[in-house]
Amino acid sequence: AQTPDKASTSTESTEAADNAAEARSWIARWRESVKAKTKTQATPAPKDTPMPSPATNEARILGAKAQLLRYCEDVARGRTATAEDAAAIEELASALESINPNPRPLENPEMLSGRWELKYTTSRSILGLNKAPWLRPRDPIYQIIDAFTSRARNEETVKSGPLTLKSAVDARLVPWLTDRNSADEVEVKFARFELFGDRIRIKAPARAIGRLQTTYLDDDLRISRGDRGNLFVLSMVDPNARLAEEIDLSARPGLARVVAGIAIGAATYQTVHIGPAAVAEKATAVVAKVNSARKSLRE
């Protein structure tokens, strides 16, 4: 007889396998429908052939989105995703990208702007997989985009027992102009890091720049891809969220901030790619040393 732990593991593995099989089956059906649609467009249909129903296409999109978001939830935003899970999510995302209703998102600032919640990513740094388990973000991770002011802000919270670490990074967005003139990609120029809920501010170096392409966009779902090949799936939580045009780069006073800024500034470019929580981890260690030194001086 199986022990409870082994039985539970077996059940979870069976469910994961069933989900993967369902995803592959759905993808296969989706591809066939896309091929059929392409063939129909290439060859004029007879007059007595009924045109595809818009409602049917909408139902397919809704089904694809539901399947994708369910999969994202099952793998804990990507933290527990196996190679098979990642492949299934990639194919579901690609299927949606192939019928993107807004292929030029920069020309639709109202839909692009708002507070988005990260549902899935392949970025190990954002997931915190290269950090201690207690420093991995498990609360929602948000990205606010304001296409009207060309601003973006990423926010995350790490909770471990009584400790709560809030961190954020502000950036400016510049349309990335290419020969294909797709209006779907921006250059992300990081401007400021915030640690401990804005108690520490660190100005980002000029070379802290990345790119982000929006490959699918509708009222409540956004799929993006970074210049390092990472996939991001986000859902809209507040379409009215906006950001001020100017970013306050003034520093917070205090010896701890100065020391932490110097220590983190020694590897500023790296901090852009390891995620705000990792920056907070480094700052926490530095501030602890400063406070310890102060205590020693008082004694």
Image (cartoon, helix red, strand yellow):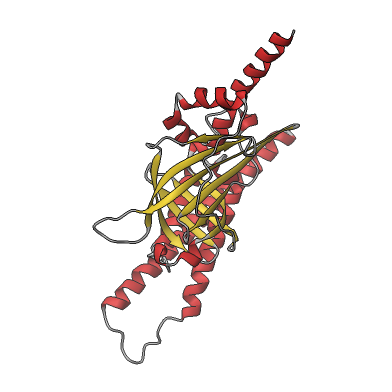
Residue 151 seen in render: yes
Q: Quadrant of residue 299?
A: top right
> Total label count?
0
* Residue 279 % position (x, y): 54, 31
Image quadrant for the N terminus? top right
In the image, taking residue 123 as reference, residue 292 lies left or right, namely: right
x and y percentages locating residue 188 in the rendered image = 41, 47
Residue 18 visible: no
Residue located 54% across and 39% down the image: 250
User: How far across and down, in percent of the image, does residue 208 sit?
Assistant: 40, 38
* Front residue (pair 291, 222): 291
- As drawn, the residue found furthest toward the bottom would be 48
Residue 194 in the image: above or below residue 92: above
Residue at 40% across, 69% down: 33
Where 247 sits versus 23, above or below? above
Above or below, comparing residue 281 to residue 75 in the picture: above
Residue extending farthest to the left is 179
Front residue (pair 246, 188): 246
Q: Can you tell which quarter of the image residue 101 is in?
A: bottom left
Depth check: 15 or 80 in front? 80
Reply above or below: 14 against 2: below
Residue 90: image location, x then y, percent: 44, 51
Residue under the point 32% across and 72% down: 38
